Protein backbone atom coordinates (compact mmCIF):
# COMPACT_ATOMS: atom_id res chain seq x y z
CA UNK A 1 0.00 0.00 0.00
CA UNK A 2 2.76 2.45 0.94
CA UNK A 3 4.68 1.42 -2.20
CA UNK A 4 2.67 3.61 -4.60
CA UNK A 5 5.16 5.85 -6.47
CA UNK A 6 4.94 9.37 -5.06
CA UNK A 7 4.62 11.23 -8.36
CA UNK A 8 1.49 9.23 -9.25
CA UNK A 9 -0.31 9.89 -6.00
CA UNK A 10 -2.84 12.65 -5.55
CA UNK A 11 -2.73 13.76 -1.91
CA UNK A 12 -5.91 12.90 -0.05
CA UNK A 13 -5.57 16.17 1.82
CA UNK A 14 -3.61 19.26 1.00
CA UNK A 15 -3.45 22.67 2.65
CA UNK A 16 -2.07 25.46 0.49
CA UNK A 17 -0.84 28.55 2.32
CA UNK A 18 -3.69 28.51 4.80
CA UNK A 19 -4.27 31.34 7.26
CA UNK A 20 -7.03 30.96 9.85
CA UNK A 21 -8.29 33.29 12.54
CA UNK A 22 -10.77 33.57 15.38
CA UNK A 23 -12.23 37.02 14.86
CA UNK A 24 -9.30 39.45 14.95
CA UNK A 25 -6.94 36.82 16.40
CA UNK A 26 -4.84 35.11 13.74
CA UNK A 27 -4.05 31.57 14.79
CA UNK A 28 -2.20 29.98 11.85
CA UNK A 29 -0.08 31.51 9.12
CA UNK A 30 0.72 30.19 5.64
CA UNK A 31 0.35 26.54 6.58
CA UNK A 32 1.00 24.16 3.68
CA UNK A 33 1.29 20.40 3.65
CA UNK A 34 0.15 17.40 1.64
CA UNK A 35 -0.96 14.08 3.07
CA UNK A 36 -0.68 11.05 0.80
CA UNK A 37 -3.35 8.36 1.01
CA UNK A 38 -2.60 5.56 3.45
CA UNK A 39 0.00 7.57 5.34
CA UNK A 40 0.00 8.79 8.92
CA UNK A 41 0.84 12.40 9.71
CA UNK A 42 1.56 13.61 13.25
CA UNK A 43 0.86 17.27 13.98
CA UNK A 44 3.07 18.40 16.85
CA UNK A 45 3.51 21.60 18.78
CA UNK A 46 3.16 23.11 22.22
CA UNK A 47 -0.08 24.43 23.76
CA UNK A 48 -1.68 27.07 21.61
CA UNK A 49 0.57 26.37 18.61
CA UNK A 50 -2.45 25.93 16.34
CA UNK A 51 -2.85 22.14 16.10
CA UNK A 52 -6.57 22.05 16.85
CA UNK A 53 -7.11 25.00 14.53
CA UNK A 54 -5.52 23.04 11.68
CA UNK A 55 -7.59 19.97 12.57
CA UNK A 56 -10.72 22.14 12.36
CA UNK A 57 -9.67 23.60 9.01
CA UNK A 58 -9.07 20.08 7.68
CA UNK A 59 -12.57 18.97 8.64
CA UNK A 60 -14.32 22.12 7.43
CA UNK A 61 -15.21 23.46 10.87
CA UNK A 62 -13.19 26.62 10.27
CA UNK A 63 -12.97 28.37 6.91
CA UNK A 64 -9.48 29.71 6.14
CA UNK A 65 -9.17 33.49 5.83
CA UNK A 66 -6.85 32.77 2.91
CA UNK A 67 -5.37 29.74 1.20
CA UNK A 68 -6.94 26.51 -0.01
CA UNK A 69 -8.05 23.14 1.31
CA UNK A 70 -7.87 20.36 -1.28
CA UNK A 71 -9.40 16.93 -0.76
CA UNK A 72 -8.41 14.19 -3.23
CA UNK A 73 -7.53 16.86 -5.78
CA UNK A 74 -10.76 18.87 -5.33
CA UNK A 75 -10.90 22.35 -3.92
CA UNK A 76 -13.23 22.11 -0.91
CA UNK A 77 -12.34 25.46 0.66
CA UNK A 78 -15.37 27.09 2.22
CA UNK A 79 -17.71 24.14 1.81
CA UNK A 80 -19.86 23.30 4.83
CA UNK A 81 -18.56 20.74 7.34
CA UNK A 82 -21.22 18.16 6.47
CA UNK A 83 -19.77 18.05 2.93
CA UNK A 84 -16.38 17.20 4.38
CA UNK A 85 -18.03 14.45 6.43
CA UNK A 86 -19.78 13.12 3.35
CA UNK A 87 -16.44 12.91 1.52
CA UNK A 88 -15.26 10.56 4.27
CA UNK A 89 -13.44 12.94 6.57
CA UNK A 90 -14.10 12.19 10.22
CA UNK A 91 -12.96 14.54 12.97
CA UNK A 92 -12.54 13.03 16.42
CA UNK A 93 -12.39 16.17 18.53
CA UNK A 94 -10.69 16.78 21.86
CA UNK A 95 -12.78 15.69 24.83
CA UNK A 96 -15.96 13.68 24.66
CA UNK A 97 -19.10 13.94 22.66
CA UNK A 98 -21.87 11.60 23.75
CA UNK A 99 -25.61 11.88 24.23
CA UNK A 100 -25.85 11.83 28.02
CA UNK A 101 -29.43 10.59 28.33
CA UNK A 102 -29.01 7.71 25.88
CA UNK A 103 -27.47 4.39 26.84
CA UNK A 104 -24.07 3.29 25.60
CA UNK A 105 -25.68 0.99 23.07
CA UNK A 106 -28.16 3.62 21.90
CA UNK A 107 -25.33 6.09 21.33
CA UNK A 108 -23.47 3.57 19.18
CA UNK A 109 -26.63 2.42 17.43
CA UNK A 110 -27.38 5.98 16.38
CA UNK A 111 -23.96 6.44 14.80
CA UNK A 112 -23.74 3.05 13.12
CA UNK A 113 -27.27 3.17 11.73
CA UNK A 114 -26.27 6.34 9.91
CA UNK A 115 -22.93 5.07 8.63
CA UNK A 116 -23.70 1.40 8.00
CA UNK A 117 -27.46 1.14 7.70
CA UNK A 118 -29.67 -1.07 9.87
CA UNK A 119 -28.15 -4.30 8.63
CA UNK A 120 -24.66 -3.20 9.61
CA UNK A 121 -25.41 -2.15 13.17
CA UNK A 122 -24.94 -5.59 14.79
CA UNK A 123 -21.48 -6.09 13.30
CA UNK A 124 -20.37 -2.58 14.16
CA UNK A 125 -21.57 -2.99 17.77
CA UNK A 126 -19.59 -6.22 18.06
CA UNK A 127 -16.51 -4.41 16.78
CA UNK A 128 -16.99 -1.57 19.26
CA UNK A 129 -17.40 -3.94 22.20
CA UNK A 130 -14.39 -6.00 21.13
CA UNK A 131 -12.38 -2.81 20.99
CA UNK A 132 -13.62 -1.58 24.37
CA UNK A 133 -14.98 -4.54 26.40
CA UNK A 134 -15.69 -2.06 29.18
CA UNK A 135 -18.40 -0.50 27.02
CA UNK A 136 -19.93 -3.92 26.40
CA UNK A 137 -20.25 -4.48 30.13
CA UNK A 138 -21.99 -1.12 30.44
CA UNK A 139 -24.07 -1.18 27.30
CA UNK A 140 -27.32 -0.34 29.10
CA UNK A 141 -25.92 2.40 31.30
CA UNK A 142 -26.80 5.97 30.31
CA UNK A 143 -23.76 7.64 28.77
CA UNK A 144 -23.99 10.65 31.08
CA UNK A 145 -23.23 8.47 34.11
CA UNK A 146 -20.11 6.87 32.62
CA UNK A 147 -16.76 7.91 34.03
CA UNK A 148 -14.75 10.45 32.03
CA UNK A 149 -12.49 7.80 30.53
CA UNK A 150 -15.46 5.59 29.65
CA UNK A 151 -17.19 8.49 27.89
CA UNK A 152 -13.99 9.07 25.96
CA UNK A 153 -13.98 5.38 24.94
CA UNK A 154 -17.57 5.72 23.77
CA UNK A 155 -16.85 8.71 21.56
CA UNK A 156 -13.74 6.95 20.22
CA UNK A 157 -15.65 3.73 19.51
CA UNK A 158 -18.04 5.77 17.39
CA UNK A 159 -15.28 7.06 15.12
CA UNK A 160 -12.84 4.15 15.14
CA UNK A 161 -15.39 1.64 13.94
CA UNK A 162 -16.54 3.86 11.08
CA UNK A 163 -13.49 3.35 8.87
CA UNK A 164 -13.39 6.83 7.33
CA UNK A 165 -11.16 7.78 4.37
CA UNK A 166 -9.40 10.35 6.51
CA UNK A 167 -9.48 10.32 10.29
CA UNK A 168 -8.45 13.51 12.02
CA UNK A 169 -7.85 12.66 15.65
CA UNK A 170 -7.25 15.45 18.15
CA UNK A 171 -5.70 14.33 21.46
CA UNK A 172 -6.97 10.77 21.28
CA UNK A 173 -5.16 9.62 24.36
CA UNK A 174 -6.28 12.49 26.58
CA UNK A 175 -7.59 11.19 29.90
CA UNK A 176 -7.21 7.52 29.03
CA UNK A 177 -5.25 4.96 31.02
CA UNK A 178 -2.02 3.84 29.29
CA UNK A 179 -3.36 0.36 28.65
CA UNK A 180 -6.39 1.81 26.83
CA UNK A 181 -4.16 4.16 24.86
CA UNK A 182 -2.17 1.14 23.65
CA UNK A 183 -5.42 -0.47 22.56
CA UNK A 184 -6.55 2.69 20.76
CA UNK A 185 -3.26 2.86 18.87
CA UNK A 186 -3.49 -0.79 17.89
CA UNK A 187 -6.90 0.04 16.45
CA UNK A 188 -5.45 2.99 14.57
CA UNK A 189 -2.88 0.67 13.01
CA UNK A 190 -5.64 -1.68 11.98
CA UNK A 191 -7.72 1.01 10.31
CA UNK A 192 -4.59 2.44 8.70
CA UNK A 193 -3.88 -1.01 7.26
CA UNK A 194 -7.45 -1.15 6.00
CA UNK A 195 -6.86 2.06 4.04
CA UNK A 196 -7.72 5.00 6.31
CA UNK A 197 -5.35 7.96 6.16
CA UNK A 198 -4.59 9.45 9.58
CA UNK A 199 -3.89 12.95 10.82
CA UNK A 200 -2.95 12.71 14.48
CA UNK A 201 -2.70 15.56 16.95
CA UNK A 202 -1.02 14.52 20.18
CA UNK A 203 0.65 16.31 23.06
CA UNK A 204 2.04 12.96 24.16
CA UNK A 205 4.07 12.42 21.05
CA UNK A 206 5.55 9.04 21.89
CA UNK A 207 2.64 7.00 20.53
CA UNK A 208 1.93 9.32 17.63
CA UNK A 209 5.52 9.23 16.39
CA UNK A 210 5.64 5.46 16.68
CA UNK A 211 2.85 5.13 14.12
CA UNK A 212 3.45 8.26 11.99
CA UNK A 213 5.30 8.36 8.67
CA UNK A 214 5.53 12.15 8.53
CA UNK A 215 5.45 14.97 11.04
CA UNK A 216 4.69 18.64 11.12
CA UNK A 217 5.97 20.77 13.96
CA UNK A 218 4.07 23.99 14.55
CA UNK A 219 5.50 26.93 16.39
CA UNK A 220 3.13 29.83 17.04
CA UNK A 221 0.90 29.04 14.11
CA UNK A 222 3.69 28.48 11.61
CA UNK A 223 5.22 25.30 10.23
CA UNK A 224 8.71 24.89 11.69
CA UNK A 225 9.23 21.38 10.29
CA UNK A 226 7.48 19.30 7.69
CA UNK A 227 8.90 15.98 6.59
CA UNK A 228 9.51 12.37 7.49
CA UNK A 229 9.52 11.41 11.16
CA UNK A 230 12.92 9.80 10.59
CA UNK A 231 14.47 13.23 9.91
CA UNK A 232 12.78 15.06 12.74
CA UNK A 233 15.84 14.69 14.95
CA UNK A 234 15.69 16.50 18.25
CA UNK A 235 13.47 19.30 16.96
CA UNK A 236 10.42 17.74 18.52
CA UNK A 237 12.17 17.52 21.89
CA UNK A 238 13.35 21.13 21.63
CA UNK A 239 9.98 22.48 20.59
CA UNK A 240 7.90 20.50 23.02
CA UNK A 241 10.48 20.73 25.76
CA UNK A 242 9.45 24.32 26.53
CA UNK A 243 11.96 26.27 24.44
CA UNK A 244 9.48 27.17 21.73
CA UNK A 245 8.72 30.63 23.06
CA UNK A 246 12.29 31.92 23.24
CA UNK A 247 11.56 35.09 21.28
CA UNK A 248 8.36 36.16 23.04
N1 LIG B 1 -12.54 29.79 19.60
C1 LIG B 1 -11.44 30.53 19.74
N2 LIG B 1 -11.51 31.88 19.88
C2 LIG B 1 -10.39 32.64 20.00
N3 LIG B 1 -9.14 32.14 20.01
C3 LIG B 1 -9.01 30.80 19.88
C4 LIG B 1 -10.14 29.93 19.74
N4 LIG B 1 -9.70 28.66 19.65
C5 LIG B 1 -8.35 28.74 19.73
N5 LIG B 1 -7.94 30.02 19.86
C6 LIG B 1 -6.54 30.48 19.96
O1 LIG B 1 -5.84 30.06 18.81
C7 LIG B 1 -4.52 29.61 19.14
C8 LIG B 1 -4.31 28.22 18.65
O2 LIG B 1 -5.18 27.37 19.39
P1 LIG B 1 -5.31 25.82 19.12
O3 LIG B 1 -6.48 25.35 19.88
O4 LIG B 1 -5.28 25.58 17.67
O5 LIG B 1 -3.95 25.31 19.77
P2 LIG B 1 -3.44 23.81 20.03
O6 LIG B 1 -2.12 23.69 19.33
O7 LIG B 1 -4.49 22.84 19.66
O8 LIG B 1 -3.18 23.83 21.59
P3 LIG B 1 -3.40 22.66 22.69
O9 LIG B 1 -2.20 21.79 22.60
O10 LIG B 1 -3.41 23.43 23.96
O11 LIG B 1 -4.68 21.95 22.39
C9 LIG B 1 -4.41 29.77 20.67
O12 LIG B 1 -3.72 30.95 20.95
C10 LIG B 1 -5.85 29.85 21.14
O13 LIG B 1 -5.98 30.64 22.28
MG1 LIG C 1 -5.62 21.49 20.75
Image (cartoon, rainbow, N blue to C red):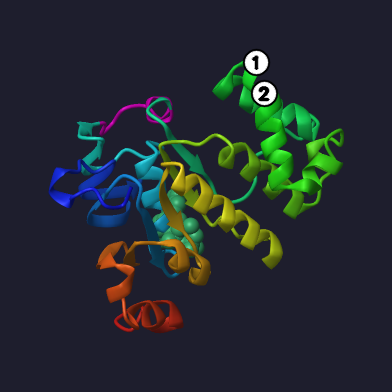
Q: Are marks 2 and 1 in contact (CB under 8 Å)?
A: yes
Q: Position of residue 134 (x, y in %)?
A: 80, 48
80 lies left or right of 72: right
Badge 1 is on which residue?
118
Badge 2 is on which residue?
121
Q: Which residue sits at x=28%, y=43%?
A: 13
Dot 1: what SS?
A: helix
Q: Position of residue 28 (x, y in %)?
A: 30, 56
Q: Position of residue 46 (x, y in %)?
A: 43, 70
Q: Which residue sits at x=61%, y=54%?
A: 184
Q: Position of residue 163 (x, y in %)?
A: 50, 36
Quarter holding the C terminus is: bottom left
| Residue 77 belongs to magenta span | yes
Magenta residues, start to end: 76-85
Q: Which residue sits at x=41%, y=25%?
A: 86
Please tell me in which quarter of the rendered image ligand 1 is found: bottom left
Quarter-of-image position of residue 101:
top right
10 Å crowding of disc 2: few (<14), some (14-19), many (20+): some
Q: Is residue 92 visible?
A: yes
Q: Is residue 47 visible?
A: no
Amino acid sequence: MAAVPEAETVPILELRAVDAAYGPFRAIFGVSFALEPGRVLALLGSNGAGKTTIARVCSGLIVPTSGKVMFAGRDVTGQPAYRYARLGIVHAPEGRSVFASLSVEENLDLTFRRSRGRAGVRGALDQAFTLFPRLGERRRQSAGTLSGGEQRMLSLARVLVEQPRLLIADELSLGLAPIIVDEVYRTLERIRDAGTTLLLVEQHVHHALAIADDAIVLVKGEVAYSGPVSELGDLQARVLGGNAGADS
